[in-house]
Every structure is written in structure tokens, then in C-alpha cells.
Amino acid sequence: MAQVKKSSTKKEAQSAKRFGLADLKPAKGATRNSLRVGRGRASGAGKTSNRGHNGEGQRSGLSSKRGFEGGQMPLFRRMPRIDGFELVNQRKWLELNVKDLAEYLLPDEDTLTYEKLEQLGVFNSRTCDGVRILGNGEIKRKVVVEAHHVTASAKQKIEAAGGQVTLLGASTK
């Protein structure tokens, strides 16, 4: 605490008295008295105690769940429908077009498997969930393909060239 200076006048001496924690109080108008409900009609909060007539909120013991919005679809369930919402567990696929399939095989090979693509270094099985074959382009040679997903047009083009498509499970992990 700061020392009190000796003052020359009585008025200065009163204003310079010590100021402690007990002297602290909120600013004027910063606090309000709590509303006393159920104290008769004249109080303005009598009868229903500002809860309204009947219904869930009028009953005692009301504790609605977090995020409850009165029966409206809650925000956490609306979010995935909003454009630009990013999936938490998004699957990462290696997408290959039909025109690129023959590039990964030697002239004497005709089978393109998941393991063969990984050995060639096209993708890493730890970061990629599987292979998808898309129907862009044309293929001239016979190729047997193993993939997790094949589009209808890609399957049609591979089989038209004399090849075959084998679908694998959802993931090799």
C-alpha cells in the first residue's frame, strides 16, 4: 500500500485515506436485482412465473439436451448438407482412366493388379484406399484388371477389347 502524504487541509486528508478491497463495488447500473418469480399477480411474474401455459418448458425439472432446437433439425445434423462441408473420413482413391491402363504393362503382360500398381510406385497403399477405373479414352489391347470400383463405361470398353474386370473388396487395409 502507498503511504499517505501529510496534507495541509482537512478536505485533502479525507480524500487521501486508504483504499482497500472492502471499498470495491460495481459501477452504478452494472448490477440488477434478481427477478423474484411466483410472488403474486402484482409482481408481474406471478401465476405462471414467466414460464407460459403448459408445455415442456413450463414443467419443473426441464433440462433440454445440448444442441436441441425445439424439434427443428439441429445444426450438427444440417452441416453435412451445406456446400463445402469437408468429410472427416474421406476416402482417397487412385483414379485411372482406360486410356492409361496399357501404359503400366509390358508388351508381354496382360494382368494389371493392385499389387502390381503398388510395386510400380503409382501409389502407396498406406495413403490410398483403393483403385477406381474411369471410362475416359480407348484401349486397344486385352487387359485383365483388378480394381475396387469400375465405371460402367470403363467395364464396357475393357470387355470390348477382349479384357476382363475383377472387383476387389472395399479396401485392402
Image (cartoon, rainbow, N blue to C red):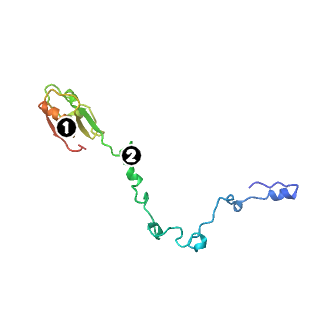
* Residue at image coords 33%, 46%: 89
The residue type indicated by label 1 comes to Ala
The residue type indicated by label 2 comes to Ile
Question: What is the spatial separation of the Cα atoms under label 2 and label 1, in whole angstroms?
Answer: 29 Å
* Residue at image coords 40%, 52%: 76
Q: Secondary structure at mark 1?
A: helix
In percent of width and height, residue 135 lies at: 22, 33
Count of numbered labels shown in the rendering? 2
Where, quadrant-wise, is the N terminus in this rendering? Answer: bottom right
In contact (CB < 8 Å): disc 2 and disc 1:
no
Q: Label 2 crowding class (10 Å Cα cut-off): few <14, some 14-19, many 20+?
A: few
In percent of width and height, residue 23 lies at: 72, 61
Hey, which residue is sitting farthest left in the picture? 162
Residue named by callout 2: 82
Q: Is residue 33 above or below residue 142?
A: below
For residue 144, say whether it is visible: no
Hey, which residue is sitting farthest top in the picture? 107
Image quadrant assignment for residue 4: bottom right
Q: Is residue 118 left or right of residue 40?
A: left
Camera-side residue of 53 and 153: 53
Camera-side residue of 39 and 60: 39
In percent of width and height, residue 8 lies at: 88, 55
Return the mark for residue 83: none
Return the mark for residue 152: 1
Q: Secondary structure at mark 2?
A: loop
Q: Is residue 76 left or right of residue 36?
A: left
For residue 107, say whether it is visible: yes
Q: Is residue 6 above or below residue 140?
A: below
Q: Is residue 82 left or right of residue 11?
A: left
Q: Is residue 124 above or below residue 66?
A: above
* Residue at image coords 36%, 47%: 81
Hey, which residue is sitting farthest bottom in the picture? 40
